[in-house]
Amino acid sequence: MMTICRSKMNQYQLNFEAEKARDIGIQRAVDHADKVTPSWSDRAVELFLAYCQENKGTTFMTEDVRWYAEALGLPEPPDKRAWGAIAMMAKKRGVIRGNGYAPQKAVNAHCAPKTVWVAL
């Protein structure tokens, strides 16, 4: 039997590569959404910010904003990962912060944990 040892350096490299791949996938998704629906991301950011303004101090998941935006007429993006880019923009603007993860991993997201946000 062969034993595999991973140094911390190798683990950091794997994490970096995984994060890079995630960011590339998210950017491709938002670029595709903007190609299918011009300025989709601009409108999505506006609606994300409006949702946060209306729900200050509450916790929510990105899906809640997506449903809100779709109810206000924003077309669904071809790939829902585009919403990841919008959430990251809101986080960078200081409108939201992470507040843990939903208790159940999402089957529709390859069992990835779902971030719970708080509107600031």
Image (cartoon, grey):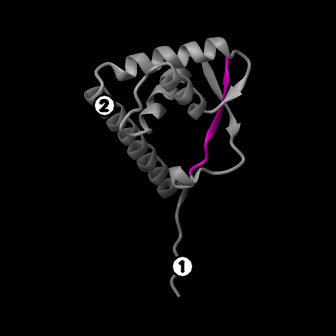
Among the two numbered marks 2 and 1 on one chain, the one whose residue lies closer to the N terminus: 1
Q: Residue 1: where, in percent of width, then height?
A: 53, 88
Question: Label 1 neighbourhood size at 10 Å, few (<14), some (14-19), many (20+)?
Answer: few
- Residue, disc 1: 3
- Say which residue appears at 55% left-offset and 29% top-offset: 67
Q: CA distance from mark 2 to mark 1?
A: 43 Å
Q: Residue 84: where, in percent of width, then height?
A: 48, 34
Q: Is residue 118 magenta?
A: yes
**Of helix, strand and loop, which one carries label 2?**
helix
In the picture, residue 3 is in which quadrant?
bottom right
- Say which residue appears at 27% left-offset and 30% top-offset: 36
The total of numbered circles placed on residues is 2
Whether residue 92 is visible here, answered yes or no, is no
Q: Residue 10: where, in percent of width, then height?
A: 47, 57
Mark 2 touching mark 1, by CB under 8 A?
no
The answer to whether 100 is drawn above or below residue 46 in the figure is below
- In this rendering, which labeled residue sits more in front, label 2 or label 1? 2
The answer to whether 92 is drawn above or below residue 25 in the figure is above
Query: In the rendered structure, which segment of residues is drawn in magenta?
Result: 112-120
Q: Mark 2: which amino acid?
A: Asp
Q: Is residue 3 magenta?
A: no
**Of helix, strand and loop, which one carries label 1?**
loop
